[in-house]
Image: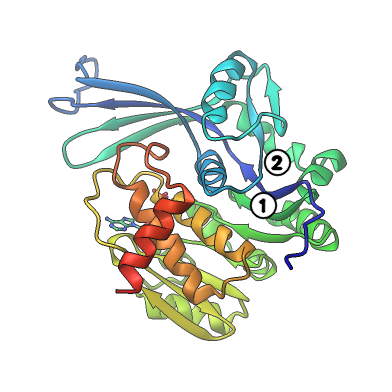
Amino acid sequence: MAVPHLKSWDVAVVGEIFADHIFTGFPHWPQPGEEVIAQGYVRELGGGSVNTACGLSRLGRRVRLVGLIGDADFDWFEQRLGEFGVGMGGIRLEHDGTGITVSVSMRDDRTFFTYPGANRGLAEWLTVPAVIADLAAARHVHFAMPLSRELAGSVLPALRAAGCTTSLDVGHTPAWLTDPANLATCREVDLFLPNAAEAALICGDPSAEAYLAWASANGLARTVLKRGALGALAMAGGVTSQVPPPVVEAVDTTGAGDAFNAGLIDAWLDDVPLGPALERACVCGALCSTAPGALAALPHSPQLRTLRERTYRS
Ligand SMILES: Nc1ncnc2c1ncn2[C@@H]1O[C@H](COP(=O)(O)OP(=O)(O)OP(=O)(O)O)[C@@H](O)[C@H]1O
Ligand SMILES: [Mg+2]
């Protein structure tokens, strides 16, 4: 018989939160002083924390999203997060506005303009004992942020003492990834989750083999390597596993890595070993890429199970 979990949440997801403004269909990049007209525009919640929290909730997990937004956006966030079953209880409202990312898509490339806004208060907020207690009420805490060494040194031991496991996706943050001080943080989390470009910055070599050798030599307990359409690799206790992704018609891979994280953490909570857990993660990443934006195609458990069985058991 399964033992009931006494914690209030399965996962607390903490990190930067954004309002994404996505402009598409420009004829060309403007010259300074010129105006160009977009064919399309959408506004959506953004940030790896939001994407992974919504992904986990879609999979049926009890999720606490922890982060900062501007008070003017409360209603919008409550309504949109509510569509995924994620509540606002872990959100703090700031007078400073919500962080903003403006994404400008040309035919071959995307450019981002970012204003951190309320996220600037996140590191300091994570030193407040009540916030640590909020995180510690979850079985697992996922950090979708470049967790500073100083903060990691206080928060990770507190969470471990409270019986939480942890994962970390710092995103594409070259300053964090190339700072040797952060190696200790990579070791202290249970799951370290870079993509290929991030792993190359950490180990100074673009090959997957070099990253896994680096992770093993430096004593990381577990790591994965997200490789886009090539799928993913994992290393746990010196043993590597590799999984190709399901073949899907990818239309927009924004947030695929965050959806992958949700699938991996979902498997982790079920005590699935890291190798087979990659299957769940790759299916989530692949399905996420089948619709525009990071949230629209996050799978429910039956969709995940169906595509996983079709892909890996046939
Ligand atoms: N074109 C694709 N086809 C199938 N699966 C994909 C595709 N792109 C991504 N995936 C799946 O999603 C996972 C994560 O994607 P990716 O490696 O692009 O992460 P990422 O760069 O961290 O993404 P992001 O930061 O935009 O969320 C991959 O490991 C793979 O399993
Ligand atoms: Mg990523």
Q: Where residue 302 appears, x then y in whole percent?
A: 44, 52
Name the residue rendered at 62%, 65% in the picture. 270
Residue position for label 2: 123
Residue type at numbered disc 2: Ala
Q: Where residue 223 appears, x then y in whole percent?
A: 54, 71
Question: Most extreme residue toward the left, as rendered?
Answer: 27
Q: Is mark 2 within 8 Å of ligand 2?
A: no
Q: Quadrant of residue 53?
A: top right
Quarter of the figure with the N terminus: bottom right
Q: Is residue 244 left or right of residue 183?
A: left
Q: Secondary structure at mark 1?
A: loop
Q: Where residue 157 appears, x then y in whole percent?
A: 81, 61
**Gap between marks 1 and 2, in whole Å?**
8 Å
Name the residue rendered at 56%, 64% in the picture. 267
- Residue 297 visible somewhere in the drawing: yes
- Residue 244 visible somewhere in the drawing: no
Name the residue rendered at 80%, 48% in the picture. 137
Residue type at numbered disc 1: Ser
Q: Is residue 255 left or right of residue 134?
A: left
Name the residue rendered at 42%, 38% in the picture. 295
Q: Does 63 appear above or below 43? A: below
Q: Where residue 38 appears, x then y in whole percent?
A: 22, 19
Q: Secondary structure at mark 2?
A: helix
Q: Nearer the viewer, residue 113 or 274?
A: 274
Quarter of the figure with the C terminus: bottom left
Residue position for label 1: 148
Q: Quadrant of residue 209?
A: bottom left
Q: Nearer the viewer, residue 109 or 304?
A: 304
Disc 1 + disc 2, Cβ < 8 Å: yes
